[in-house]
Amino acid sequence: MKVTLKVWRQRNASSPGEFRTYQTPDLNPNMSFLEMLDVVNDSLTARGEEPIAFAHDCREGICGTCSLVINGKPHGPHRLVASCQTYMRSFHDGETIVVEPFRAKPFPIVKDLVTDRRAFDRIMAAGGFISVRTGAAPDANSLPVSKEAADRAMDAAACIGCGACVAACKNASAMLFVSAKVSQYSLLPQGQPERYRRVLGMVAKMDEEGFGNCTVTGACEAVCPKGISLDFIARLNREYSTALLRESIGRTAGSDGGA
Amino acid sequence: MKLESKVPSGALEQKWTKHLGDIKLVNPANKRKYEIIVVGGGLAGSSAAASLAELGYKVKCVIYHDSARRAHSVAAQGGINAAKNYQNDGDSVHRLFYDTIKGGDYRAREANVYRLAQVSVKIIDQCVAQGVPFAREYGGLLANRSFGGAQVSRTFYARGQTGQQLLLGAYSALMKTVGAGAVQMLPHEEMMDVVLVNGHAKGVICRNLNTGKVTRHNADAVVLATGGYGNVFNLSTYGRLSNTTAIWRAYKRGACFANPCFTQIHPTCIPVSGDYQSKLTLMSESLRNDGRIWVPKKKEDSRKSPGDIAEEDRDYYLERMYPSYGNLAPRDISSRAAKKVCDEGRGVGDSGLGVYLDFSDAIRRLGENAVRERYGNLFDIYKEITNEDAYRSPMRIFPAVHYTMGGLWVDYNLMSSIPGLFVLGEANFSDHGANRLGASALMQGLADGYFVIPFTIGDYLAQLKPGSRPASDAPEFAEAEQQVLGRIQKLLSIRGKQPVSHFHKRLGKILWDHCGMARNARGLEKALQEIPALREEFWSNVNVPGDSADLNQSLENAHRVADFLELGELMCRDALDRDESCGCHFREEHIDAEGECDRNDEHYAYVAAWEYAGEGKKPVLNKEPLVYEAVKMVKRNYK
């Protein structure tokens, strides 16, 4: 099979970008989308042109590095898969495929299809952790956690931090990302002491970084390669409003009781 | 060079405790006067950077990703071992230690492995306290499963994403210290060289991948936690960016490289489908708890659909050859067995390079839902890649490069042969010998980062005067920076005919053919001819487009492949020199009557630590004898 690519090319953050069109060499339908780009890049190199820059690493859908908008959809046509797990058999011979970077103000473009998503790290540094000094932990089984809570926390913890939720949102909201981390910890007994401090810190940083608010369109959940549920945003809202309320009466630190 | 392992004296069980009492400490008020550079942000790097910063040291953490959460530790699926004995099935520190030593075919350092087993229990405590959502039983306590090479259930897991969850735990600890201003992250920076001042590691040279800017960073000590080098084979289960550059540059500055030929070929990966392929995907070893591995008994059945092959015509070869471990035989043995049945023409799939991993018995026994709950995400990955449903027909799997047991030589303190240069996790050689057991890589990365380096680095730093680190305008920094800039210019000026990938693929093929699952002197000698020739061709005919003023992925890759082209030669030299079979290193000249490894303890019970001797010169082989005080070296038997 062969396809036509319309690819966003942009030299760096300060230069203007544009779409450029490329015809691919002959492709095998079992190639991954990124392998197709590898092949195109080798042919561009052979012609003396600069290859298309794109972010990738693990190529098995877990590191969250790959970040393509394929035909207008973050991570491409299929539900629950990342760009790197999209295969050429999902497209038809002769199709024109539009490839763009994740677009959001807090994710400035570095080059072509590569964006800078360090804003997520800064949100994490503002509260996305349980403070436990190395070596200070009690025996792991001294604190039973119900299977339901552990499983639900794991559902939230499965987030790979790719930012597709932001790219899909008309407000460039990072609420799905933030809610996943806040929910993971608020569901677990270990997360209680810093429960309210955490949500206040992370939300404040999220706002400061320029991510927008959630208007519950659900676009984020629809494109999330790990199926992080919109329910977690509801949980985030509850955690946040409780924290605000507590703050207003001078009680901010942790939770008094269980989850 | 004389290699001093610095293993403490005394009984094996007491060595680590005794050592902790003996090594020097840095006064808390002085800790902030020392600066440490940690290179790498995976399990070992993140846990080390966070723990060192908590102690009060000034820490810089260099990563080439935007975020430490993307390091390839994230992709580990199955689990992490710990000698908790929560299952009451007879596990103990000694048993985990013994399984690891035996699994490594008696080519690991005994005292390091014992320490690893000792601290394993603390890792689980640490991770649970951080909020890592390990799998639990209905009573709320932690669940376990079994992994290869063990007869107890000691593996803790978080669905099929254990590496991700452990990394996110370490990463969150790191982010906490970043938020507190205790760690400075240097993202998008690739370490290009180590700087030595008076023979001690005192800094690094980095290149910013987004801007191309080359910078100097001085420190009192440097910690490398940069992972393994399996991408030298081009096709592997590693992330595409994983590389050898950091440890290779350290090697060229004088750090010995130990057992470079010890490469783990993982038995359960999705088979190669075409020459465009960029990466191989692992199917976790945990699948072997419930999946049964087989091929047709008869060659002529190998093209048939698996459902058309009657039960009596199937050869469950691992269960037949290794009845006591069965499908949970260690990785090297399972991989070799797969190669053997495929060499006999009984392999399945289009290429004939595949065996079945069949869940039909487990689905009958447990029901599809229970299987889905245990392995659902792995079945999904399999479906995405192959377009086949493993609930209906067996998976096809084949061995693939997965891990490197070899790495920079380190002493008991994890310090390399360059004073002040420490090496953690997969980047060092110390704990897995000639074969690593499943679920032990995560254990080692976190053991090194959380529970070893925070103590042992103090022993080195306490010998330095606070504030005595050389400034980054010292001539040694300028010299190293010039070399880096010179190499960048050289790569950009060749403008040959072939892309970098062309050379990487050819190198990978040479190594897979001659330094892979089976090796022999003739093949290795051939590879030792071919690799230098390929390297020469690379330096005269590679095409690296663009410049170094902004993001240039071809240039990044060219640097990495240039180093692989040197490392590949050292691997073959090491494999040729080790004229015995042990663990993953299967020399066809040394096979016993049953077709297994014929180890030669009399002549090869040593760590081969190679020392760089200069451009075009044969490296010097230093030997650290492996002395076993507590275990007897016996023939490994899983039958």
Image (cartoon, grey):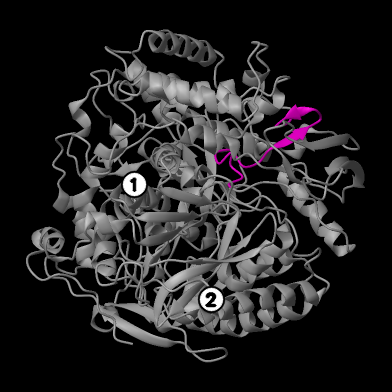
Chain identifier of the residue bearing label 1 in the image: B
Task: In the rendered view, tell whether residue B150 sits above or below residue B308.
Answer: below
> Residue A99 got which mark?
none
Which of B143/A134 is in front?
A: A134
**Same-chain check, marks 2 and 1:** yes
Image quarter where the C terminus of chain B lies is: bottom left
For the N terminus of chain B, give its image quadrant.
bottom left
Q: Which residue is mark 2?
A: B477
Q: Position of residue B94 (x, y in %)?
A: 14, 53
Which residue has dot 1 on it? B328
Where residue B440 appears, as percent x and y from the top left, is 33, 51
As measured in the structure, the alpha-carbon distance from the residue carrying label 2 to the one carrying label 1 is 50 Å
Q: Nearer the viewer, residue B336 or A4?
A: A4
Label 1 sits on a secondary structure element that is helix
Amino acid carrying label 2: it is: Phe
Q: Which residues are magenta?
A: A58-76
Q: What is the chain identity of the residue bearing mark 2?
A: B
Q: Is residue B549 magenta?
A: no
Looking at the picture, how far across and down is residue A227, in whole percent?
A: 57, 22
Label 2 residue SS: helix
Q: Nearer the viewer, residue B502 or B58?
A: B58
Disc 1 residue crowd, few under 14, some 14–19, many 20+, Cα 10 Å: many
Between disc 2 and disc 1, whose residue precedes?
Answer: 1
Q: Main secondary structure of the magenta part?
A: loop
Above or below, B280 against A89 in this view is below
Residue at the image position 61 percent from the left and 48 percent from the top: A57
Is residue B539 shown left or right of residue A250? right
Q: Which of the 4 image quadrants contains residue B589?
A: bottom left
Do we see residue B562 in this rendering? yes
